[in-house]
Image: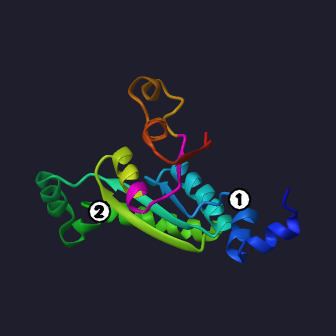
């Protein structure tokens, strides 16, 4: 049997830090759509990332605007149309989420707007960033539509290859 003293002499300082911290997360991805539920998930993810010294990646999926939507926005808003089409609303949501994450304790924060379906977008970000934790709010989990059609939290929990934290927000 190896004593603590002998064990510590066999391990480097980095190894001891890993043992002390346990299986700390290195990269935490959180999805947001601007809803209060998703912002609660951002708060929790930021706290986890801050405590672990991990990088927090805040992701927001969006659907590209159709040509007719862009034309309508330009007719009504003129030069300001860029604010409501394409990734601009997602970018605004990400800025709000970044501000919240900073207040909640995250220090290393990246944001990314991803074109496409929320579930596929989150899985893509998790893969690209080599994340080891995905955090989402529980919005839609307890609704009839969510039970029949599925919800973002249930789908990512089912399809994700990493740990998933579903934050209770309702």
- Neighbor class of circle 2 (other Cα within 10 Å; few <14, some 14-19, many 20+) is many
Q: Which residue is mark 2?
A: 87
Give, as a single range, the part of the protein colored magenta.
126-138
Vertical comparison of 86 with 105: above or below: above
Q: Which residue is mark 1?
A: 22
Q: Residue at x 38, y 44 (%)?
A: 119
User: Could you say which is closer to the camera, residue 136 or residue 22?
Assistant: 22
Query: Closer to the observer: label 2 or label 1?
Result: 1
Judged from the image, the secondary structure of the residue bearing numbered disc 2 is: loop
Tell whether 142 sits left or right of 75.
Answer: right
Residue 128 on the magenta segment:
yes
Vertical comparison of 41 with 46: above or below: above
Tell whether 75 sits left or right of 166.
Answer: left
Q: Quadrant of the N terminus?
A: bottom right
Where residue 167 appears, as percent x and y from the top left, is: 60, 45
Tell whether 120 sits left or right of 77.
Answer: right
Work out which residue is located at the far front of the displayed protein and give it.
Answer: 1
Q: Residue at x 53, y 65 (%)?
A: 56
Identify the mark nearer the N-term, 2 or 1: 1
- Neighbor class of circle 1 (other Cα within 10 Å; few <14, some 14-19, many 20+) is few
């Amino acid at each position: 049997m190896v004593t603590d003293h002998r064990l510590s002499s066999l391990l480097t300082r980095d190894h001891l830090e890993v043992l002390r911290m346990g299986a700390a997360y290195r990269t935490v991805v959180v999805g947001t759509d601007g809803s209060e539920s998703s912002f609660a998930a951002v708060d929790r993810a930021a706290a986890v990332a801050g405590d672990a010294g991990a990088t927090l990646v805040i992701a927001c999926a969006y659907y590209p605007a159709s040509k007719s939507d862009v034309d309508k926005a330009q007719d009504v808003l003129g030069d300001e149309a860029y604010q409501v089409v394409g990734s601009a609303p997602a970018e605004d949501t990400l800025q709000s989420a970044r501000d919240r994450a900073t207040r909640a304790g995250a220090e290393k924060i990246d944001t990314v707007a991803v074109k496409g379906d929320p579930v596929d977008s989150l899985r893509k970000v998790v893969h690209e960033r080599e994340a080891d934790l995905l955090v989402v709010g529980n919005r839609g989990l307890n609704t009839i539509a969510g039970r029949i059609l599925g919800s973002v939290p249930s789908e990512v929990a089912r399809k994700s290859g990493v740990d998933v934290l579903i934050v209770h927000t309702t």
